[in-house]
């Protein structure tokens, strides 16, 4: 099967490029399953149930989150009820949401989970290496295809986690930095890997936020509201080819789809973000 994994969807621009381009791309590329990190979908931080539903309509089959998972508390109802979204696996057992899910898309079964890194991350979390082992022990025997979103800052930590997962997971795609890396590869003849797929959002920005206030805050040391930018909008991710019967990835490639500059006003025509 062909799996598209895309990185942090940032605000309206990120949702817009998916609304306009995702279904066409998946048709052209014969994509079977689309997995997206949506921790920044709501005004740049968090995800609401309404936006989750929108992303599903745009063609996203599975949603992962990150350190902003609970930024919009309303998402807890979706985390409790839907098998198409997971919270990071190395949060406390009491945290709302599933650490692992296995869902069926057009007859193909896929297991999905995510891990938070610990280096340069504000949120204190359990050891991602041990959490990964615990989660993988729970994958149903008949589900061969497993996808992991590695949500972390430090490249070294991501590479170490990827090597820990190599041979046991079909696809490991890095998220959180919002900057794509060029190191896509197959590890242990089984695991498609990239350190970061980059964000799905506005690249005329600093990590999706408007340049001016980020620069002003950096230069003056004073707080400024970091509104979501809107220029140079792209969808970024990887496409992995995976053998359904073994779960082994056979190919991986980086992909990028640009929202045409003449697309008109940014927004997905389905209501406001409700603030940044
Ligand atoms: Fe993010
Ligand atoms: Fe993040």
Image (spheres, rainbow, N blue to C red):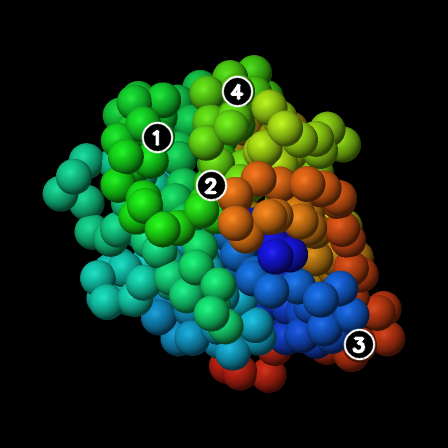
Numbered badge on residue 163 = 4
SS state under label 4: helix
Q: Pick whichever of labels 1 and 4 is earlier in the sequence.
A: 1
Q: Which residue is at the front of the view, 24 or 233?
A: 24
Q: Pick whichever of labels 2 and 3 is earlier in the sequence.
A: 2
Q: Is mark 4 within 8 Å of ligand 2?
A: no
Taking the image as shown, residue 67 lies to the left or right of residue 161, namely: left
Give the quarter of the image for residue 3.
Answer: bottom right
Q: Can the viewer see residue 154?
A: no
How far is mark 2 from mark 4, CA to CA?
Answer: 13 Å
How far is mark 1 from mark 2, CA to CA?
Answer: 9 Å
Q: Where is residue 226 in the image (x, y as percent from the top left)?
A: 55, 48
Q: Where is residue 114 in the image (x, y as percent from the top left)?
A: 40, 41
Residue named by callout 1: 132
Rendered position, 183 above or below 71: above
The crowd level at tag 4 (other Cα within 10 Å; few <14, some 14-19, many 20+) is some
């Amino acid at each position: 099967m062909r799996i598209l994994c895309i990185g942090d969807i940032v605000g309206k621009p990120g949702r817009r490029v998916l609304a306009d381009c995702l279904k066409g791309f998946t048709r052209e590329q014969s994509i079977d399953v689309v997995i997206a990190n949506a921790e920044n979908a709501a005004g740049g931080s968090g995800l609401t149930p309404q936006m989750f539903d929108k992303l599903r309509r745009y063609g996203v089959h599975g949603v992962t989150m990150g350190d902003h998972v609970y930024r919009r508390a309303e998402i807890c109802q979706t985390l409790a009820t839907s098998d198409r979204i997971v919270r990071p696996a190395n949060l406390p057992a009491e945290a709302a949401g599933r650490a692992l899910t296995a869902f069926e898309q057009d007859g193909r079964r896929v297991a999905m989970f995510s891990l938070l890194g610990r280096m340069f991350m504000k949120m204190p979390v359990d050891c991602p290496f041990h959490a990964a082992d615990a989660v993988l022990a729970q994958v149903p025997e008949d589900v061969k295809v497993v996808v992991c979103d590695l949500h972390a800052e430090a490249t070294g930590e991501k590479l170490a986690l990827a090597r820990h997962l190599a041979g046991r997971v079909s696809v490991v795609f890095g998220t959180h930095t919002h900057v794509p890396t060029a190191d896509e590869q197959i590890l242990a003849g089984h695991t498609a890997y990239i350190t970061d797929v980059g964000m799905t959002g506005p690249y005329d920005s600093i990590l999706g936020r408007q340049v001016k206030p980020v620069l002003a805050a950096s230069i003056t040391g004073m707080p400024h509201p970091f509104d979501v930018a809107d220029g140079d909008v792209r969808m970024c991710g990887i496409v992995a080819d995976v053998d359904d019967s073994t779960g082994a990835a056979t190919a991986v490639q980086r992909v990028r789809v640009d929202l045409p500059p003449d697309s008109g006003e940014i927004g997905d025509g389905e209501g406001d973000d409700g603030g940044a």
